[in-house]
Image: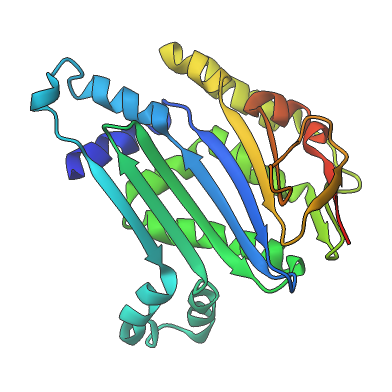
Amino acid sequence: MKRYLFVVASLLLLTSCNFTEEITFNEDGSGEFIMSYDMGEVMKTVEEKMGGGQSDEGKENVKMDSIIYFKDMLTEKADSISKLPQEEQDKLKALENIVMRMKMDQEEGLFNIGIGSSFKSLAELPETLENIENAKSLNSKGDPSFSKMGESQVAKASEGMFEYIDFSYDGKTFSRSLKEGYKKSDQDFEALNTEISEMGEAKEMFEAMSYTVIYNFPKPIKSVTNKNAEISKDRKTVRLKMNFIEMIKSPEKMVLDVVLED
């Protein structure tokens, strides 16, 4: 198991993954933000590197389904944390609502990592996103797979976009828009392009990467402005999927307004 995860970590820079940004709202405007990394392709590549020619009988079906609550981790390390400077204690306390989910099933080709946090109102989302990044940095000290993920230009591009994305929600209308004065960074895009061009055989997988946004609401959806968005059968969820590279090139294509029924 440890060997398997070690190989996964070493391949995160060489293999693609699909990203999902999901927000779930409650009636009172509170909710949860989760950023997920679907690395099913990583799973396939790992199997090849570790001897994909083995018979099914000789293979170990690696399975894992775990949830890590940072609040529990902070409680467990309370004595050590109390010895830190107050500023550091406050930073760690801000992470208590962070949750990390990991699910793997080698036989099913499933490998998903998600990290997120709850919020009392959407106004807290920028702080929530910052706490998620801090939690990933903290966790990477003990698990190289997450630090490797963060070093990738692909991961940086997906997370860096929140610097120019605005969210708003008043219980009636939800908006995902570009911040005023947003300007594309040709330098960042060139860095991403260079990383992909150097991937060799993995280039096609990178170019096929997707970015999906999923927004769940407590009331049925009346309308959505983005013509490519899909509304669920119960009309409480909107989903929009786009090629990752195209999304980085043209983030305006992921802009949308969702109007809810009264």
Please name the residue shown 13% across and 19% down the image: 54
Q: Residue furthest front?
A: 234
Residue closest to the eye, 29 or 230 = 230
Image quadrant occupied by the N terminus: top left
Give the percent coordinates (x, y) of residue 101: 42, 55
Q: Residue furthest left?
A: 58
Please name the residue shown 65% across and 55% down the image: 23
Q: Is residue 237 left or right of residue 91?
A: right
Image quadrant occupied by the C terminus: bottom right
Give the percent coordinates (x, y) of residue 12: 40, 34
Q: Is residue 230 left or right of residue 16?
A: right
**Res. 178 visible in picture:** no
Q: Is residue 155 above or below residue 126?
A: above
Please name the residue shown 50% across and 86% down the image: 86
Looking at the rendering, which quadrant does residue 15 occupy? Answer: top left
Residue closest to the eye, 150 or 3 = 3
Please name the residue shown 66% across and 45% down the image: 214
Q: Is residue 19 above or below residue 71?
A: above
Give the percent coordinates (x, y) of residue 215: 69, 50
